[in-house]
Image (tube, rainbow, N blue to C red):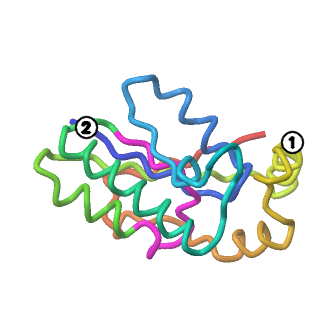
Amino acid sequence: MPTVYVPIGIPGSGKSTYYETLGSHVTHVSPDNHLYRNGTYATSPQRRKEAWRQAFTVVEGAIARGEDVYFDATNLTVKARQRLLWMARHARHAYRVVGLHFVVPFDVCEERNRQRPANRRPTLEAMQDMERSLEVPDLREGFTDIRRVGGQ
């Protein structure tokens, strides 16, 4: 049965790295990939909205083809996850939806983010806001399974 993987965690918690463990058969979708233009990370509100629209279009196509999908974003809140869960539930193919809750100490995430290029590094305040806004995933949202992913 095809699977939609929904990683849930703040920047630096290991979401993108975890994708690499799944294998090349899983379609990787990240709104961040649509924010790059001519080597520049464009983050205007209009550009961010367009990046998310493009990412969901890619997800729709992959689901229509019955592919496994990894939606690489923070997915911190129930509201942020709703669209992916809805898309999987209403797919032509039966889908499993696996929530991957990344539970990593804040200082580890902060250190990992310091290793990122400056134009891709969230501020400390932004990371703290994201950590505060994180809503722990729950099966009642519509997940088939939720896995806790730890890190160092």
Local crowd at mark 2 within 10 Å, few (<14), some, or many (≥20)?
Answer: some
The answer to whether residue 70 is magenta is yes
Residue at label 2?
Answer: 2
Residue at image position (33%, 50%) is 59
* Label 1: element kind: loop
Left or right: 63, with 29 as reference point: left
Numbered-mark total: 2
Secondary structure under tag 2 reads: loop
Residue at mark 1: 115
User: Where is the C terminus found, in terms of image quarters?
Assistant: top right
The residue at 32%/62% (across/down) is 85
Q: Which residue shows up at 86% across the image and 42% down it? A: 115
> Residue 21, position in %: x, y?
54, 27
Where are the magenta residues, as a range?
69-81
In this orientation, which residue lies closer to the viewer: 36 or 137?
36
Q: CA separation, marks 1 and 2?
A: 34 Å
Q: Quadrant of the N terminus?
A: top left
